[in-house]
Amino acid sequence: MLWVGLLCWATAVNAGITVTCVTEENRPVNFLENGRVTGFSTEVVEAVLKEIDVQASIQIMPWARAYATALHSENVLIFSIMRTAEREHLFKWVGVVSPPDSSYLFALRERKLKLDNLGDARNYKIGTINSDAREQYLESRGFVKGRHLHGNALPRTTYEKLKLGRVDLWAMSEMVATDIVRRDGGDPSQVLARVLHLADLGSGGSYMAFGTKTDDLLVERFRRGLETVKANGTFAALQKKWF
């Protein structure tokens, strides 16, 4: 299993604060290429760090580890994280750093699976990413890890299990699922079927956020930096570059 994780160590100038940023391998917003972390959201975060005069180096880790690190530690920035009802009070939210996206339960089109509602999905094995928003959402609706839900560290691993028939459904964002299938040489419209829209998760972009142990002044500093990056056209330019 490929372990990819992102640690971004940064020193907040004039404040003497060390910030740790964490993310996952999740094309096209965060990923490792030629030994360097890149992607749309990564470049947005880098632009914010530059705007607020913070030096940073970047690596990648599995989502469950990144999530736990941000949740339980002080001065840890996580991106790109979906803002959900289950997470609302667990983090201090900075702002959106990825384009709009939607989540689905996908199946291989050739299997011709049909779900009338979420409850029907309990009859199938669902591939998820450990601790991601879709897995947490399904758990909150009574789906059980190890029985209904089969977690993995990486989206591509889950897709491989879908192709091999080890899971029946794939809980994933449309943007990431489409990218993975294309990189695998397939046509997403021919390979995958959107069996059920997880509409409760919304379709807005993902965020950067801090855990609740982080001081509000530091969170506000990042918010102002992100607002500036959006106001001065940098965010729009990066979105045009990547999408």
Image (cartoon, rainbow, N blue to C red):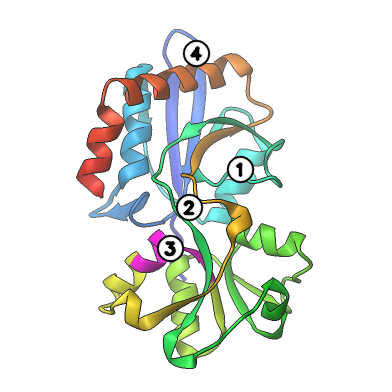
Of labels 4 and 1, earlier in sequence is 4
Q: CA distance from mark 2 to mark 1?
A: 10 Å
Instruction: Tell me the mark number nearer the camera, choosing from 4 and 1.
Output: 1
Q: Residues within 10 Å of mark 4 (few under 14, many from 20)?
A: few
Q: Which residue is mark 2?
A: 61
Q: Residue furthest top?
A: 14
Q: Amino acid at mark 2?
A: Met
Q: Using the numbered discs, state the Cα–Cα distance from disc 2 to disc 4 in whole angstroms.
A: 25 Å
Is residue 175 magenta-colored? yes
Question: In percent of the image, x 65 and y 84: which residue is there?
Answer: 124
- Which residue appears at 62% of the width and 80% of the height? 115
Which mark identifies residue 174? Answer: 3
Indicate the secondary structure of the residue bearing disc 3: helix
Q: Which residues are magenta?
A: 171-178
Q: Amino acid at mark 3?
A: Glu
Q: Which residue is mark 1?
A: 69
Question: Marks 4 and 1, Cα distance to the nearest angstrom?
Answer: 21 Å
Residue at (43, 86) in percent of width and height: 109
Q: Residue drawn at (46%, 61%), measured in percent from left and top?
A: 3
Query: In the displayed structure, would residue 59 be above or below residue 231?
Result: below
From mark 3 to mark 4, how far is it between C-alphas? 40 Å
- Between the C-alphas of marks 1 and 3, the distance is 26 Å
